[in-house]
Image: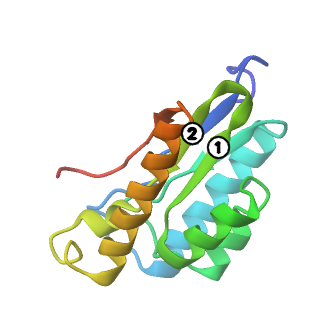
Amino acid sequence: MRTRHSENVEFVLWTGDIIAARYNVNEDERYQAIRNITELLRMTFSSHFVFPVLGHTDPAPSESLTNLWSHWLPMEALQTLRNGGYYTIEQTQSKLRIVALNTNLFTVREEKSIHARRQWEWLDAVLEKATSNKEMVIAPLSIDSF
């Protein structure tokens, strides 16, 4: 990877789902896979921002996951990541906003949960702010189907 990217990379979007859904692995193994990829991306893109997004097969948001990505994300993003698995990053220079959603909350079993409702309310407020600031929004997602 290191030899294939140029120095013109502004940021990296990491869309999650490190382990395919067909593999039967436990939560610890999923976390270890994320940790390994985090380290690889940190070494490869040391001077760049990497914006990770939880995929639907990734572990649930946790303090450990938040700590793992703390070198890439600001405190406000880390708080919503820890609490719900989603966050936003505002790139003020380029009028760009990255919105990372927790696609685990899109599943049928979660769609009516309080966590899903909070994410939609949060997203509504984020998009209102982006509209008033005339920002372009990128929302990378990782899910099999809606």
Of residues 54 and 18, the one nearer the viewer is 54
Q: Are marks 1 and 2 in contact (CB under 8 Å)?
A: yes
* View extreme (right): residue: 47
Q: Secondary structure at mark 2?
A: strand
* Image position of 67 with respect to 132: above or below: below
Type of residue at label 1? Answer: Glu
The numbered mark, 1 or 2, whose residue comes first in the sequence reads 1
Residue at x 59%, y 32% (from the top left corner): 96
SS at mark 1 in the image: strand
Question: Rounded to the nearest whole Å, what is the CA distance between mark 1 and mark 2?
Answer: 5 Å
**Residue 123, image x, y percentages:** 41, 57
Residue 138, image x and y in percent? 47, 36
Label 1 Cα crowd, 10 Å radius (few <14 / some 14-19 / many 20+): some
Q: Is residue 19 in view from this perspective?
A: no
Residue 82, compared with residue 107, is above or below; it is below
In the rendering, at what x and y percent does residue 112 appear? 19, 77
In the image, taking residue 134 as reference, residue 75 lies left or right, namely right
Please give the name of the residue rendered at 55% of the width and 42% of the height, measured from the top-left corner: 98
Q: Position of residue 45 (x, y in %)?
A: 76, 37
- Assign the N terminus to one quadrant of the image: top right
Q: Residues within 10 Å of mark 2 (few under 14, many from 20)?
A: many
Look at 71% across and 48% down and name the residue there.
Answer: 40
Q: Give the quarter of the image for residue 120.
A: bottom left
Direction from residue 103 to residue 65 in the image, left or right: right
- Would residue 5 appear left or right of 85 to someone viewing this image? right
Q: Which mark is residue 78?
A: none
The type of residue carrying mark 2 is Arg
Location of residue 23 (image quadrant): bottom left
User: Which residue bears the numbered disc 1?
Assistant: 90
The residue identified by callout 2 is 97
Measuring 48% from the left and 73% from the top, which residue is drawn there? 84
